Amino acid sequence: MTDDVKVHRTTRKTAVSNGVTSPAVKPRTRVAKATPPQMAFDLFADIAADLTCGVDEVGRGPLAGPVVTAAVILDPSRPIKGLADSKKLTALRREALYEEIVERSLAFCIAEASVAEIDSLNILHATMLAMQRAVNGLSRVPALALIDGNRCPVLPMRAEAVIKGDDKVPAISAASILAKVTRDRQLAALHEEFPQYGFDEHVGYGTPRHLEALRTHGPSPHHRQSFAPVRDAFEIFGTLTVSRVVRTS
């Protein structure tokens, strides 16, 4: 994996993949207040009237790997059963729903911000940048973007922040599943190159095993130098000390 931004966009029948490299320009963000219960009911009741996308991210907390976001426009005529917060689903169920979302949604886009962008911008601004890329990469332009959490990126359409939206709004649930499956696959691939960290187990989060591996082996090129445990490892080792494992058949 490189630091180039990987964007995957699709319509119901066609999938397109390309790489985009964007300058590390700090994106603007705005803070949105939490939606009160009655306002939330009215907002969700209005969803059918607009072409709405759900947006979510995965990977703000880990010490390694990119932050991955997704934007999804669901097709009301092709409902998907069982959509929920990706963290509450088993890996097997997420994989199955991933395929359904790809097949049945009107449009989706998966985007990311690289480790280099996270270290340059900070994790919040990198997340907002990745969300912008996901929404702007959709093959259809939504009238409304519903963003999981309490902040919205600056977008060319109306945007609303929905706290715990991945449990409340099906389109956000779908976005969380696409982002989670994509990032988990990326970290599984990193495990093949850097097995000493256990990325297949903790997908980059700062578990005791991961922290011990950092202290023992030092950081890899995929670790976020702006995060304290990685920064501490750099101070001890002074440089990148780990090379990928080259596997031969």
Image (cartoon, rainbow, N blue to C red):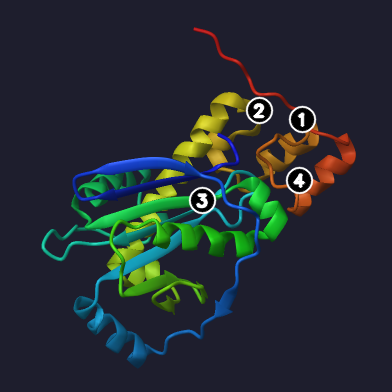
Instruction: Give the mark, 3 or 2, whose residue is nearer the N terminus.
Output: 3
Which residue appears at 28% of the width and 42% of the height? 15
> Percent position (x, y) of residue 12?
20, 50
Instruction: Give the mark, 4 or 3, whose residue is nearer the N terminus.
Output: 3
Give the Cα distance between marks 3 and 1. Answer: 27 Å
Question: In this rendering, is residue 40 above or below 188?
Answer: below
> Percent position (x, y) of residue 39?
35, 90
> Percent position (x, y) of residue 10?
29, 48
Q: Are marks 4 and 2 in contact (CB under 8 Å)?
A: no
Q: Which residue is denoted by mark 2 in the rendering?
A: 196
Q: Are marks 4 and 3 in contact (CB under 8 Å)?
A: no
Instruction: Give the mark, 1 or 4, whose residue is nearer the N terminus.
Output: 1
Instruction: Give the mark, 4 or 2, whose residue is nearer the N terminus.
Output: 2
Q: Secondary structure at mark 1?
A: helix
What is the number of the mark on residue 112?
Answer: 3
Q: Are marks 1 and 4 in contact (CB under 8 Å)?
A: no
Instruction: Give the mark, 3 or 1, whose residue is nearer the N terminus.
Output: 3
Q: Which amino acid is tagged 2?
A: Gln
Q: Which residue is denoted by mark 4 in the rendering?
A: 230
- Label 1 neighbour load within 10 Å: few <14, some 14-19, many 20+: some
Q: Which amino acid is tagged 1?
A: His
User: In this view of the protein, can residue 46 be seen by the observer?
Assistant: yes
Q: Which residue is denoted by mark 1 in the rendering?
A: 217
User: In this view of the protein, can residue 206 be seen by the observer?
Assistant: no
> Percent position (x, y) of residue 150?
51, 77
Q: Which amino acid is tagged 4?
A: Val
Q: Are marks 1 and 2 in contact (CB under 8 Å)?
A: yes
Give the Cα distance between marks 1 and 2. Answer: 8 Å
Q: Secondary structure at mark 2?
A: helix
